Image: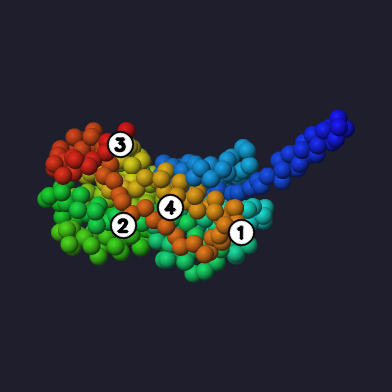
Amino acid sequence: MKKFAALMIALILALSCFAVAEEESYTIGIAQFAEHGSLDNCREGFLAGLAEEGIVEGENLTVEYQNAQADTSMATTIASNFVANGYDLICAIATPIAVCAYNAAEDEIPVIYTAVSAPEEAGLTDGGNVTGTSDELPVAKQLETIRAMLPDAKKIGILYTTSEVNSLSTIETYKFLAPDYGFEIVESGISTAADIPLALDALLGKVDCLTNLTDNTVVSALALVLDKANAAGKPVFGSEIEQVKLGCVAAEGLDYIALGRQTGLMAAKVLKGEVKAGDMAYEVISDPSLYVNAEALARFGITLSDDLAARAIEAE
């Protein structure tokens, strides 16, 4: 009887060890296009979403994180290396690097993107093992808010990178909707961050305010944009909370941690084999929030209407 009990204990221990050994583990690459708050928040939210589904970095998840520093050539190299390493999945944060990852993966590895404003225009809905989340801006709501805060304004300036598909698409939306709110859009395209000072000097004299897109090159240089705009007495409206924290007066924007979390939940389904990435439609967060910077509002003498004040969230 004692021998039998000992054998059973040994069998149970062996099966337990086997189960631990067989526990699924994953290795993924996170490719981020640039270093700024909204994209950082996407990454944080993405890992939180995976963790909610039991896929936890340091336990059953290994992550290689690479940042392209707003360099498209570097983004291409990062994506190619991730594919060559045979990772289980690539998370691509922002449009330029999402396109690079999609092209490099060629259906070999699932690509889950986030912070992509216009997936269709970027070619990320043309088939393949790819899906993710879009941060399409609530342009109409932003224009409505700018009009409410600046009742006498006529011209809105937009600085953008000519190579960023997401920016080109959003500018067209702004130009289409702006007349409905009594605005004219004045745009200025740049190729690199080095072009920003001269472009701003020319743009600021023509407009009553600026509004930012989710343009990675411009957002990465937001401190410079704000310095020049403040010196010129022109308020800058952001596109999400991190830009408002840095000094933009306000933004009708998304919660990028929530967007990243939504992306992580999608990625978990793919890693667990519940669904192929290409079989899931991309998802969006549809309800923007109004974020405001009280100090910046005071600097420009902007007073919130009762309706705006009732839903404003102080960005701290």
Say which residue label 4 marks.
115
Whole-number angstrom distance, CA of label 3 to CA of label 2: 28 Å
Give, as a three-letter code, the residue at label 2. Answer: Ser
Say which residue label 1 marks.
109
Say which residue label 2 marks.
188
Q: Farthest bottom residue?
A: 126
Whole-number angstrom distance, CA of label 2 to CA of label 4: 23 Å
For label 3, the SS is loop
Give whichever of discs 3 and 4 has the lower sequence position. 4
User: Foreground: 264 or 72?
Assistant: 264
Give, as a three-letter code, the residue at label 3. Answer: Ala
Give whichever of discs 4 and 1 has the lower sequence position. 1
Taking the spot 42% from the left edge, 43% from the top edge, the residue there is: 257
Instruction: Provide residue 83's location: percent of width, then percent of height.
Output: 63, 56
Whole-number angstrom distance, CA of label 3 to CA of label 4: 20 Å
- On screen, residue 299 above or below 173: above
Mark 2 residue crowding within 10 angstroms, few (<14) / some (14–19) / many (20+): some
Instruction: Provide residue 41's location: percent of width, then percent of height.
Output: 44, 42
User: Foreground: 206 or 214?
Assistant: 214
Say which residue label 3 marks.
315
Instruction: Provide residue 249's location: percent of width, then percent of height.
Output: 25, 41
Front label number (3 vs 2): 3
Q: Farthest front residue?
A: 1
Mark 4 residue crowding within 10 angstroms, few (<14) / some (14–19) / many (20+): many
Residue 160 shows up from this direction = no
For label 2, the SS is strand
Taking the spot 15% from the left edge, 55% from the top edge, the residue there is: 154
